[in-house]
Amino acid sequence: MIKGYRKTELSERSFKVGIFSIALLFTAVFTVHAQDTIPQTEEFILAPAPEMGQICKLPPTDINRNYFKKAEERYRKMADNEVRSANFEITYVNSCSDGSEWPSQAQNAFEYAMGIWETYLQSEIPIRIEASWTQRDENVLGSAGPTLISRPQNGEPDTWYSIAQASAMSGVDQLEGNQFGEEHDIVINMNCNFSDWYFGTDAQTPQGFIDFVTVVLHEIGHGIGFIGTMGVNEDAQTGSYGLGDNNWPFIYDRFTEDGLGNELLNTNVFPNPSVELYRALTGQRSGVYFTGNDARGVFSGQRVPLYAPSEWNGGSSYSHLDQATFSQQQNLESALMRPRIDRQFAVHSPGPVFCGMLSDWGWPLGSSCLELVGAESEIFVDSQYTVDGLDFGVTNVGERVERTFEIENLATAEDPLSYSINIDNDNFVISPAGLASGSVDPGESVMVTVRYIPSRDRIHEGTIRISHNASNAASPISISLKGEALRADEIARLEDNYPNPFNPTTTIPYVLPETSDVRLDIYNVSGQLVQTLVNTQQGEGRYNLQFDAANLASGMYFYRLIVNDNVFVKRLLLVK
């Protein structure tokens, strides 16, 4: 969905996370201060996203990197919507001081970047972006951040998540009806005064230009959660973390440690606030690292270095990958979240490291990310489901039918199995929604319940696609789904026989939404009973009864179905 309108003044949202300069590309560190948190439901707590502590500008890099990483081939072909496991919606805002509006090429590049992210994430809830074309200082390309933060019930205790991730994890649209009046999950501002944009989508950025798609991909990355709460007081030389009345950290913070292996949230080592934490955040304790298992798994088993210069750069330090490490040729595929961008550089993918971090945070992943994460896990889904599928039989509109299947990580596996489930028909849903993605340890399994809740009286068919990071099977694994619904008040449905006219056999179809007493009779035109085909109790389902009239004379006959004292009659014609 695309919208557009004009604003004459910049919103305060311009000062949220994610300032993106040419040299210091991106900023995502917050001022740590108390926020009022307001319980929304029993499932989650919602609060305004914090504002950014500092806007940091560094000289632009003069490096022409000459590195190009295109989007995945299946996305570039744009022919298969099945790869889209998330849906982004955008509202364009025009607020440039010179009156200029979003260039059509810039909009095309922005939507191309959103489409890439739609294959890497899994979310039943739309991710809504407000994108402003606005004036920024010469060295600032843009800014971005979540509008709200949330603590979903199925997340880590006492931990904040971006609202987009919280909605994706819980299956509940936490933005809808919020008391803060926010209409978007993410706000992004792009510099309308920058003259060296490259708006192409082919990842062939010319010398001296900055790739717009790469910038947008990075900014969305901050909006979906590449953010931490760590900050410093330069005057006191103390570091601190946490947001809200209870000083809860972001999920990102729970995976960070210093170079000596001490968790930054360990108050025995790093009181909050403390000089010790300041020293860690400024790299004086042998650096800062991200330690999630999935991120390490795609980084040769090593901790992932974060940006920790000796002089704290608010909006740049900590909430980015290390600039030097991810400027090395072998790491450029994962260089999207560096704090600086080179000219003639394009990376149209989050990269394996970012996908691993998303997996560690519990972000439900789409197939593109799961394939990059990879692992020595071994998935098993019984062929009963992959061959025969799940048949939900017959029910009435508004009713629900449940079926279950099992996802197992074999005991011979060495790593946890990460999986994500996508269904292409809205009449079938995973229950609870939190089981749509998850992690399964070796030797363990998870039972997944699928609900069929038909909205219309018809036959519904769909496909479950289980994206995974296992090494023993192709991803995704598919399971077919089928269910049939009658109207809400329909006791049974008697359908036309086929063929009709017939000689000498025909099929009489009927449908039952529940177990019923059933009688099916054939009568001639004089009302005489010719034959009883069924006279018993039958379970719900679709039935196709064969009627053989070889011993009958040509002519008109009637077939009458009685279901729990309800009578249905149709006619058939025998022609010999």
Image (tube, grey):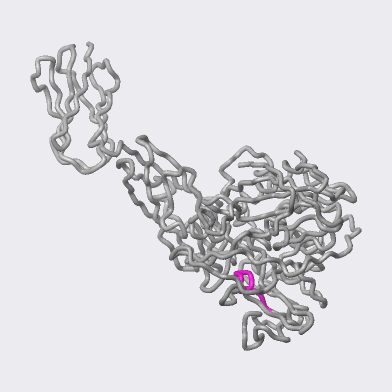
For this view, does 44 lie left or right of residue 222? left
The quarter in which the N terminus is drawn is top right
**Quarter-of-image position of residue 241:** bottom right
User: Who's the residue at 66% across and 72% down the image?
Assistant: 229
Left or right of residue 572, residue 235 in this image: right
Q: Residue at x 57, y 68 (%)?
A: 160
- Looking at the figure, which quarter contains the C terminus? top left
Residue 14, given in percent of the width and then of the height, sits at: 72, 58
Q: Outermost residue toward the front?
A: 8
| Dominant secondary structure, magenta | helix
Q: Is residue 159 above or below residue 522?
A: below
**Residues rendered magenta in the picture:** 250-257
In percent of width and height, residue 427 lies at 42, 44
Q: Is residue 139 left or right of residue 515?
A: right
Q: Residue furthest bottom?
A: 268
Q: Determine whether 542 is above or below 53 in the image.
A: above
Q: Position of residue 436 (x, y in %)?
A: 48, 56
Residue 252 within the segment the image draws in magenta: yes
On whether residue 56 falls in the magenta region, the answer is no
> Could you tell whether 297 is left or right of 532 in the image?
right
